[in-house]
């Protein structure tokens, strides 16, 4: 049976991300990232590392957002690295992430660019 609580495929991260945002789970969101991951968010800024990622999501979740699932575009996989992307339902332009397969088989985000608009 497939473990639905960890990303067993690169595309699983999109589903897990939406589930955890809608559940208000900042720690669970941070668990989708490697400890030294980088997020290009908020626009024009860089968020680096687990503590900063938890703080970023705590701030975002304080606004009680509700996200809808966005179907992943074709994933590019090379060995233990993958490039995932979705076409957003908002004005973000696009979303793209680099994810890496961990020794235990799950996938985690390394680089996250959730917004490609200028700003």
Image (cartoon, rainbow, N blue to C red):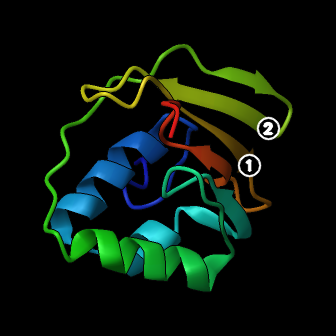
Image coordinates of residue 108 in percent, x first then y, are 63, 55
The residue lying at 18 percent from left, 60 percent from top is 22
The residue lying at 61 percent from left, 21 percent from top is 75
Considering only vertical position in the picture, is 106 above or below 50? Answer: above
Q: Nearer the viewer, residue 87 or 40?
A: 40
Considering only vertical position in the picture, is 111 above or below 115? Answer: below
SS state under label 2 = strand
Image coordinates of residue 34 in percent, x first then y, are 69, 66
Q: Which of marks 2 and 1 is nearer the N terminus?
A: 2
Which label sits on residue 64? none
Farthest front residue in view? 119
Q: Quadrant of residue 80?
A: top right
The residue lying at 48 percent from left, 38 percent from top is 115
Image coordinates of residue 57 in percent, x first then y, are 39, 72
* Residue where numbered disc 1 is placed: 101
Neighbours of disc 2 within 10 Å: few (<14), some (14-19), many (20+): some
Considering only vertical position in the picture, is 47 above or below 119? Answer: below
Marks 2,1: beta carbons within 8 A: yes
Image coordinates of residue 39 in percent, x first then y, are 61, 56
Q: Is residue 36 left or right of residue 28?
A: right
Q: Which of 40 and 30 is in front in this view?
A: 40
The residue lying at 58 percent from left, 51 percent from top is 44
* Residue where numbered disc 2 is placed: 81
């Amino acid at each position: 049976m497939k473990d639905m609580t960890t990303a067993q495929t690169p595309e699983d991260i999109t589903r897990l991300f939406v589930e955890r945002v809608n559940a208000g789970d900042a720690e669970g969101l941070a668990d989708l990232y490697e400890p030294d991951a980088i997020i290009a968010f908020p626009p024009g800024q860089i968020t680096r590392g687990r503590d900063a990622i938890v703080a970023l999501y705590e701030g975002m979740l304080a606004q009680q957002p509700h996200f809808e699932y966005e179907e992943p575009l074709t994933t590019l996989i090379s060995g233990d690295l993958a490039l995932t992307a979705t076409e957003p339902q908002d004005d973000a332009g696009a979303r793209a992430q680099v994810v890496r397969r961990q020794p235990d088989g799950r996938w985690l985000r390394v680089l996250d660019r959730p917004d490609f608009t200028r700003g």
